[in-house]
């Protein structure tokens, strides 16, 4: 598994470049296998990326009927609540795609309601949804690209520092009842599922993320910086802006390539 760090000059460029990269990745993947399974993330940058994907010139070239959308985590709120990642993703990408993306290809985490009155029920239902699209003998689809945002505390999905969920080794999806970031009730994929993805892309912008980015790239313990444990089986891609990269040692040698931050797997870094 390789790790690559790409630093863009600002958040706007990061968003546009990530969207373009994702569209090209989807087109390339569809040339070798179908369906393609993509895991979405929320947050300001994550939703901005989806909006840029919908507006991208390559968007119509993707066969969206062969793309399945999933979520790495969700806020346990009623259906239609504007704070749900799913609702924001629908406005940014899914609704603009219209009939190009079949409704059956959108796998949202169950919303809070009679069929999912608590996080455990919502998690169990999402596990069942994953199993329905898994290959024989597997518990979930093999995700081709899994997008993750990054919190200033180093959390990814709804896996927060110091929580028992970080050590979960069997369950694929869990409830989080005490999120330090509102709302407190959430549902999240766990590391056994996240790290089964072929590629994990971590997208972060802003100086408030700099310490967490540097900590994760330096190989900090997952218990203190959960993002350090987010790795794909084939590639882990860090897509960050210059402000988020401020604390990562990247000497300017004029070559366009940067020194590798401390790590276990091979890595390359570059500024674009």
Image (tube, rainbow, N blue to C red):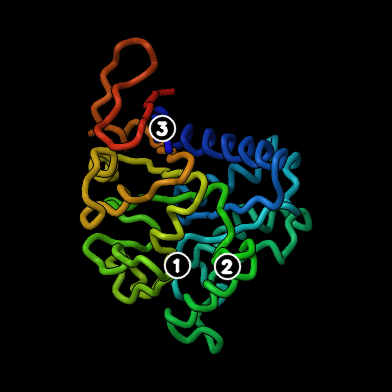
User: Neighbour class for label 2 at 10 Å: few (<14), some, many (≥20)?
Assistant: some
Residue beneath the point at 38% across and 34% down = 241
Q: Is residue 249 left or right of residue 93?
A: left
Residue 30, picture quadrant: top right
Q: Which residue is mark 2?
A: 130
Residue beneath the point at 61% across and 53% down = 37
Which image quarter holds the C terminus? top left
Contact between marks 2 and 1 (CB within 8 A): the answer is yes
- Res 44 label: none
User: Percent x, y for residue 57?
Assistant: 69, 35
Give the residue furthest to the front.
137
User: Neighbour class for label 1 at 10 Å: few (<14), some, many (≥20)?
Assistant: many
Residue 99, picture quadrant: bottom right
Q: Is residue 188 left or right of residue 208?
A: right
Look at the numbered disc 1 and give the secondary structure of its residue: loop
Which image quarter holds the N terminus? top left
User: Neighbour class for label 3 at 10 Å: few (<14), some, many (≥20)?
Assistant: some
Mark nearer the N terminus (3 vs 2): 3
Q: Is residue 67 left or right of residue 88?
A: right
Look at the numbered disc 3 and give the secondary structure of its residue: strand
* Eye-nearest disc, 1 or 3: 1
- Res 172 label: 1
Mark nearer the N terminus (1 vs 3): 3
- Given residues 91 and 189, the one toward you in this image is 189
User: Percent x, y for residue 261?
Assistant: 27, 30
Residue beneath the point at 51% across and 51% down = 47
Look at the numbered disc 2 and give the secondary structure of its residue: helix
Q: Which residue is mark 3?
A: 4
Contact between marks 1 and 3 (CB within 8 A): the answer is no
Compute the Cα span from label 3 to label 2: 28 Å
- Given residues 143 and 227, the one toward you in this image is 143
Compared to 210, does 76 lie above or below? below
């Amino acid at each position: 598994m390789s790790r690559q760090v790409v630093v863009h000059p600002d958040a706007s460029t990061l968003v546009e470049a990530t969207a373009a990269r994702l569209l090209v990745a989807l087109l390339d993947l569809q040339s070798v296998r179908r369906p393609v399974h993509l895991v979405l993330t929320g947050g300001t940058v994550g939703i901005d990326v989806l909006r840029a994907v919908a507006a991208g010139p390559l968007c119509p070239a993707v066969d969206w009927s062969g793309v399945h959308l999933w979520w790495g985590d969700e806020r346990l709120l009623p259906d239609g609540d504007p704070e749900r990642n799913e609702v924001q993703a629908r406005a940014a990408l899914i609704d603009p795609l219209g009939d190009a993306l079949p409704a059956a290809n959108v796998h949202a985490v169950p919303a809070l309601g009679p069929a999912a009155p608590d996080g455990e029920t919502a998690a169990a239902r999402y596990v069942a949804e994953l199993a329905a699209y898994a290959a024989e003998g597997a518990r979930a689809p093999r995700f081709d690209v899994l997008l993750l945002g990054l919190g200033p505390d180093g959390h990814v999905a709804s896996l927060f520092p110091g929580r028992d969920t970080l050590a979960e080794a069997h369950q694929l999806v869990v409830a989080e009842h005490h999120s330090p970031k509102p709302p407190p009730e959430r549902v999240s994929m766990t590391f056994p599922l996240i790290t089964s993805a072929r590629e994990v892309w971590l997208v972060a912008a802003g100086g408030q993320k700099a310490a967490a980015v540097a900590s994760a790239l330096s190989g900090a313990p997952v218990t203190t910086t959960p993002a350090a444990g987010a790795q794909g089986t084939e590639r882990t891609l860090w897509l960050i802006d210059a402000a988020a990269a401020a604390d990562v040692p990247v000497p300017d040698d004029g070559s366009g390539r940067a020194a590798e931050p401390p790590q276990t797997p091979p890595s390359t870094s570059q500024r674009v």
